[in-house]
Amino acid sequence: MTIGILTSGGDAPGMNAAIRAIVRAGLYHGWRVVGINRGYVGLMSGDTREMTSTSVSEIIGRGGTILYTARSEEMMSLGGQARAAANCREMGLDALIVIGGDGSFRGARALADLGIPVIGVPGTIDLDIPCTDYTIGFDTAVNTAMEAIDKIRDTSSSHERCSIVEVMGRSAGYIALYCAISTGAEDVLMPERWHGDEQELIRNVLERRNLGKKHSLIINAEGVGHSEELAKKIEAATGVESRATILGYLQRGGSPTCRDRIMATLMGGRAVDLIAEGKLNRVVAYRKDGIVDYEIHEALEMKKEMGNVLYSMMPMLRQ
Ligand code: F6P
């Protein structure tokens, strides 16, 4: 039995912990484990390495992915998918485990349709995969962003400024919402809820000044964007000095938190169990009862609905 493993799309802290769990669990079953470098790009060029127990030593606490990652345009084309499937056959892969986000799962689904058995493991800081309530990397990313925002708050408060901090998340606002609640921000803008009413934001900043607050902190999701522009508009309308900070890639790096190491280990372990049980073409997921799995087509058709509990607390907390 030979299994392949790759990481694809944006890297996420905890991917290494998942790789480690998969390699060790695979070897435990007596299988051969092949690491594919640079995601689907490496799959198409046949860029592989043999995974041994020692090749995953001392990586559980390391951010990034030792297998490297890439976004592959080619994997979106039928030709690219056929080439990737042909290489899986040539490598003698009995199954391929793909650690990544929704885009990576779509690549895996295409391979499944071409007869290559696949398992998806959700890894992205964005928490935007509909079939799962947790994705590897989210906890580390929000903790990293939270600490950075706490620091921005210190200087913003000393200068009595308004700070707009833009966080990652692509078109999802989970990182923004968690950061806003955990840093005590006054406002949060997220693609799922943003109404486009800048006047309301401006009114909120002025209200807080009138209440005697010395600074304002607004968390903006990258899916809403225009942070610099917003800062200028707020400053012009309120007279409050305003600054935008875009946190950027620092949110994707760093040593994974305990939660990410545990979730990655559980999810990686389940991926190998599924193969051992002959349950193929599935995506590992997390729901409130623990680790579950879904058929890959079914998983990719699910829609995500952001809960309202945290968001609905914002007006009360900003007082
Ligand atoms: O999906 C993770 C993520 O960091 C998103 O939050 C962001 O929109 C995107 O990746 C950035 O991608 P890239 O590394 O290709 O610039």
Image (cartoon, grey):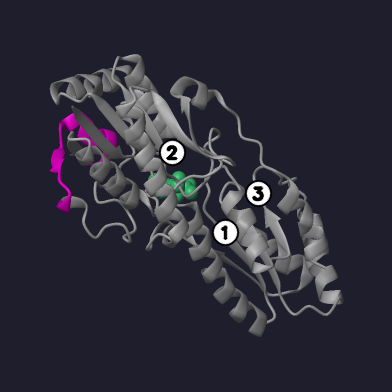
Question: Could you tell me residue 117's position as x and y percent?
Answer: 31, 21
Residue depicted at 22% across the width and 52% down the height: 56
Instruction: Decide if residue 36 is in sight here.
Output: no
Does 245 appear above or below 20? Answer: below
The Cα–Cα distance between marks 2 and 1, rounded to whole angstroms, is: 21 Å
Question: Is the Cβ of the residue at disc 2 closer than 8 Å to that at disc 1?
Answer: no
The Cα–Cα distance between marks 3 and 1, rounded to whole angstroms, is: 10 Å
Say what secondary structure mark 3 lies in: loop
Which sits earlier in the primary sequence, circle 3 or circle 2? 2
Is residue 52 within the magenta segment? Answer: yes
Question: Which residue type carries mark 1?
Answer: Glu
Q: Which mark is residue 190?
A: 3
**2 or 1: mark nearer the eye:** 2
Q: Residues within 10 Å of mark 1 (few under 14, many from 20)?
A: many
Does 74 appear above or below 244? Answer: above
Does 278 appear above or below 134? Answer: above
Q: Quadrant of the C terminus?
A: bottom right
Q: Is residue 1 left or right of residue 116?
A: left
Q: Which mark is residue 166?
A: 1
Q: Quadrant of residue 124?
A: top left
